[in-house]
Image (cartoon, rainbow, N blue to C red):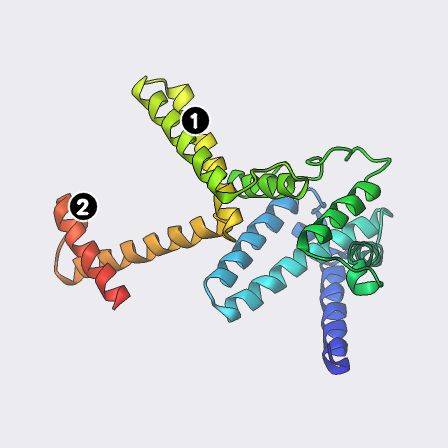
Amino acid sequence: MSERNSDAHTSAMKELLAVIDTLIAPNGCPWDQEQTPESLCDYLAEETFELIEGIRSGDSTEAMEELGDVMFILLFISILYEKDGAHTLADSLKHNVAKMIRRHPHVFADKKFKDMEELWDNWERTKREENKGTDKKCVFDSLPKGLPPLLKAYRINSKAARNKFTWNSDEEVEVQLKDEWREWQEALAAKDQDASEKEFGDYLFTLVELGRRKGIKANAALDFANQKFLGRFGQMEKLAEQRDLVLSDLSLDEMNGLWDEIKAGNEA
């Protein structure tokens, strides 16, 4: 990072911190004055999802704006903790700096790793050392409980693999996936709703792991699929309107015809 950019970042950070200080001051905003770290959690989650949407849409301007919103909430939370005498923003940043340096001895020290597997082994050992004396004694104790299920499934499989608890090959995962599919179909055939839901979950969990091994993050992949469907459906609605058609009045075959037109146009 150039010195000029570093100065610009520092100046902008100071400006934003000053804005927050003004908002929560006695003559500031009544809403901001009532906030706590706990009350801001939902806003942080919402702004984070909006940032993710901006990034994945490829809209750099939107990402820039949403990144600022996320930073605002993060700094707001930090200032509230500082006001309560808990810790400062500097404490958080210094703690993270020390942690990143400690977990990257191949970058900040003279440690050498022969491959990525050895690097991840060291990462996990370092985390275990860091967690000594805390309530995070097991492999998955550090996994946030509030993660969305699909993202959590990916992280579970990833952490299990780092601790060498996984299938030996992709082919073995594919065999397991077929077994999970068969068990789901058997539960469906038995009209056992509870078993069907559980077996479907097992199938999804295994599919997430197969994707992970292929370099695919299931949560992101599904989000892209969602956006693609929504985009095409919106185009289909517009096409129907242009032809003076009411989409809800069309048969499935007629809607599929419009869908195929949109799909062919997008792939052209």
- Residue shown at the point (74%, 45%) measured from the top left: 124
How many marks the image carries: the answer is 2
Residue neighbourhood size for the residue with mark 1, other residues' Cα within 10 Å, grouped as few (<14), some (14–19), many (≥20) = many
Q: Residue furthest bottom?
A: 4
Question: Which residue in the protein does label 2 denote?
Answer: 248
Measuring from the top left, give residue 212's x and y in whole percent.
Answer: 53, 47
- Give the image location of residue 105, x and y in percent: 81, 59
Residue at the image position 71 percent from the left and 66 percent from the top: 16
Q: Residue 148 falls in which quadrant of the image?
A: top right
Mark 2, secondary structure of its residue: helix
Expressed as whole percent of the image width and height from the top left, the position of residue 179 reads 42, 30
Q: Amino acid at mark 2?
A: Ser
Pick whichever of labels 1 and 2 is earlier in the sequence.
Answer: 1
Q: Say which quarter of the image contains residue 142.
A: top right
Q: Which mark is residue 199?
A: 1
| Up-down relation of residue 2 to residue 117 (above or below) | below
Residue found 24% across the figure and 59% down from its top? 263
Residue 66's quadrant in the figure? Answer: bottom right
179 left or right of 106 in image? left
Crowding at label 2, few (<14), some or many (≥20) Cα neighbours within 10 Å? Answer: few
- Left or right: where does residue 58 sit relative to residue 86? left
The image quadrant where one finds the C terminus is: bottom left
Q: Nearer the viewer, residue 47 or 205?
A: 205
- Give SS at disc 1: helix
* Image position, residue 170 (x, y; %): 50, 44
Residue 119 vertical placement versus 199 (above, below): below
Q: What distance separates the C-alpha of mark 1 from that of mark 2?
A: 34 Å
Type of the residue with mark 1: Glu
